[in-house]
Image (tube, grey):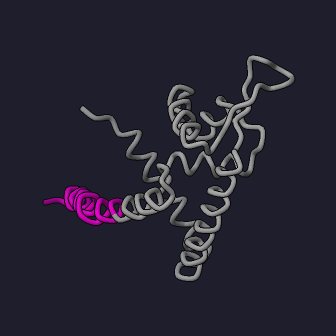
Amino acid sequence: MDETAEQQQMVVDMMTEGYLSSFRQIEKVLGKVSSKFGVGWSGLSILNQLATNQSANVSDLAEKNHVTKGAISIQISELMKAKLIEMDEDPNDRRRHIVKLTSKGQKMADHEVAQAKEMASQVLNNMGEAEMMRLHTDFAAFAHLLEDTKLE
């Protein structure tokens, strides 16, 4: 096997053994967080975004979450059923609706933010900011490379 083939096999092995195991572990943690709050990870993300942006609309949330308006509408419907968010008509544009947290949603968002900060503290204590930034940058680059790979 030539050097390029060996390197390719090394990357395939890392992806199938190491990365998938790590991704599954991350998914398990995210699943535990979702179970604890009774809301899916996407819903928690929306609650967090609304906690910091009091005047978000469906388009804003769709753009921020890199999904379609239809996909974000499904999330919004679920959060409305749980009485975590509500929609109000924009007083300046009746076609536009503002999505905002209910008091129940605000409490959940506050609790989720506190939990996220605790997790972030543990990460920073063990990895440090520079290593975490490098991991974030490398992970994003890796994801884009995989995304850009054509499947045949």
Q: Where is residue 117 in the image (x, y as percent from the top left)?
A: 63, 69
Instruction: Between residue 108 and residue 98, name the one nearer to us.
Output: 108
Q: In which quarter of the image is the N terminus?
A: bottom left
Q: Give the range drawn in magenta.
A: 1-24
Within the magenta stretch, is there residue 115?
no
Location of the C terminus (image quadrant): top left
Using the image as rendered, state which of residue 75 and residue 124 is in the foreground: 75
Is residue 81 rendered to the left or right of residue 102? left
Query: Residue 60, image x and y in percent?
Result: 68, 34
Q: Magenta stretch: residue 19 in it?
A: yes
Q: Is residue 147 left or right of residue 68?
A: left
Identify the residue at the far bottom of this view. 125
Q: Is residue 105 left or right of residue 24?
A: right
Q: Is residue 104 above or below residue 63?
A: below
Of all residues shown, which one is farthest toward the left? Answer: 1
Which residue is at the far top?
95
Residue positioned 77% across, 43% down in the render? 54
